Image: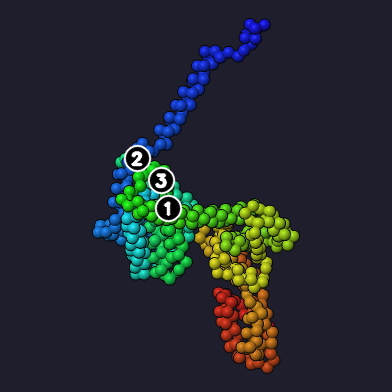
Amino acid sequence: MENSNNNNDIKVTPNDEEFEQVKLNTWQSIKQFLKELFDIRADTDRDATIDAVKKDISFKGHTAWILIFSIFVASIGLNVSSTAVVIGAMLISPLMGPIVGIGLSVAINDVETLRRSLINLGVMVFLSVLTAFLYFKLSPLTEETPELIARTYPTILDVLIAIFGGLGLIVAKTKSGTIASVIFGVAIATALMPPLCTVGYGLAIGNASYAGGALYLFSINAVFIALSTFIVSKILRFPLVRYANSKRRKRISQIASLIAIAVMVPSVWLFIKLLDQQVFENRAKEFVNKTVKYDGAEVVKFTQDYKTKDIDVYFIGRPVPQSKINEWLKELESTDKLETARLRIYQGTDQSGEMAARLSGEIKAGILEDLYVKNEQIIQNKDERIRFLEDQITMLRVKSIPFEEVSKELKINYENVETFSYSNKITTNFKKTDTLPVINIRWKKNVPAKQRQEELKKIEAWIKFKMKLDTLDVSEYR
């Protein structure tokens, strides 16, 4: 019995032991490979990195002139909307040095380096904005370009670019033998200079929102680059600056910690806020594209406002019934991140003053642009495009004629008019279709024919000006 029990016991064969050893060796090899792949401590020259960062902080002589010239180049590139010129300006800009210096000095408790970095950064920013301001103030070309508008407000993507760009920069600087191409690439990606040029542009044309938004974008880039430098310096355990006085060392350490907290807390809050805004805008766009649909009606434009949580949708075509709009509202309330949003529908058949106002100015131009883009495939030549846009402009103008206001003014200015009527006449020569506004006047009895003709010409000129019409047919009842 004893022998039988022993035979039933589980035994580890030599093959099993070899297999376990192979598994262990494989795991150790993988760990070693990953360590060699991602470990940057072994190839980090801390002392050389600190010296290189401190050297790049200084701002005088050649560096000042390089900055001025690069600002001029960037301003010209933004002015003519040339991406290549703007990139060239960013490559020669020395703006990155003081920002990296701020992050490193806070990480190693070096107050003297922090003070130099802040002073030099302030001087650089002031000189950059002043140079851009003078350029745009003296330049005859002050038109808004896509390159300028793109730098007037930050998005979550700008934050992510600043974070990963800053990490790439400081990691490249810590390597023995700095990787210059990485530093140039970060200078382009983080785009510190164009926002400062846009600040100068906003001040030059008197647009405070442009200047404020661009300065906001620059601040975000600078803060997150410095924050990335701080984090990497701490991870790589850069040596702290030693002070002979222990009380002074403790005080400096406390100051550095407070500065780090003061930078990190608002940065995290800002990141969350911008992320929330981006999510809201993406969800609003997705909701309109997938849900807000109705047969016979077409969305020509929609806008979303994160601050007011308004989603405005503009329709043309068949009127959308209120029951369908109510379905959209219910679905909006159950959509994640859009629970508090407010959906507002504007329809082309709505003749209210609010709709007329909404269809004017910028919205009208946007609708025309969208209509043009949607119909571009069926419009084959320049003449057809011109006729198409003229027809759309005429239709929009017809919808927004203030008939009641015009009739009251007409009655005050021309007391001999008995009745005033307005209608639209659609005419075609089988090649082109036009909508022609028609005005009919009925005069009171005993008004001389000569006086009627004179006043009819005045009425025609006045209504054309009042209604902003190019063509108008004014006649009198016979």
User: In this rendering, would 275 be left or right of 34?
Assistant: right
Q: In whole angstroms, how far apart are the C-alphas of marks 1 and 2?
A: 24 Å
Which of 455/64 is in front? Answer: 64
Q: Which of marks 1 and 2 is nearer the N terminus?
A: 2
Instruction: Indicate which label's residue lies in the foreground, 1 or 3.
Output: 1
Asked whether the residues under the numbered discs 1 and 3 touch, taking CB atoms below 8 Å apart as contact, a structural biologist would say no
Mark 1 crowdedness (10 Å alpha carbons): few <14, some 14-19, many ≥20: some
Which quadrant of the figure contains the N terminus?
A: top right
Mark 2 crowdedness (10 Å alpha carbons): few <14, some 14-19, many ≥20: some
Label 1 amino acid? Ser
Residue ID at (56%, 54%): 276
Q: What element carries label 1?
A: helix
Which quadrant of the figure contains the C terminus?
A: bottom right
- Residue highlighted by disc 1: 257
Which of 167/25 is in front? Answer: 25
Label 3 amino acid? Lys
Observer able to see residue 92: no
Instruction: Indicate which label's residue lies in the foreground, 1 or 2.
Output: 1
- Position in image of residue 231 (x %, y %): 42, 47
Q: Give residue 196's quadrant in the image.
A: bottom left
- Position in image of residue 170 (x %, y %): 38, 46
Marking on residue 44: 2
Q: Which colour scheme is used?
A: rainbow
Q: What element carries label 3?
A: helix
Marking on residue 388: none
Q: Which of marks 1 and 3 is nearer the N terminus?
A: 3
Q: Earlier in the sequence, mark 3 or mark 2?
A: 2
Which of 104/379 is in front? Answer: 104
Observer able to see residue 224: yes
Marking on residue 234: 3
Label 2 amino acid? Thr
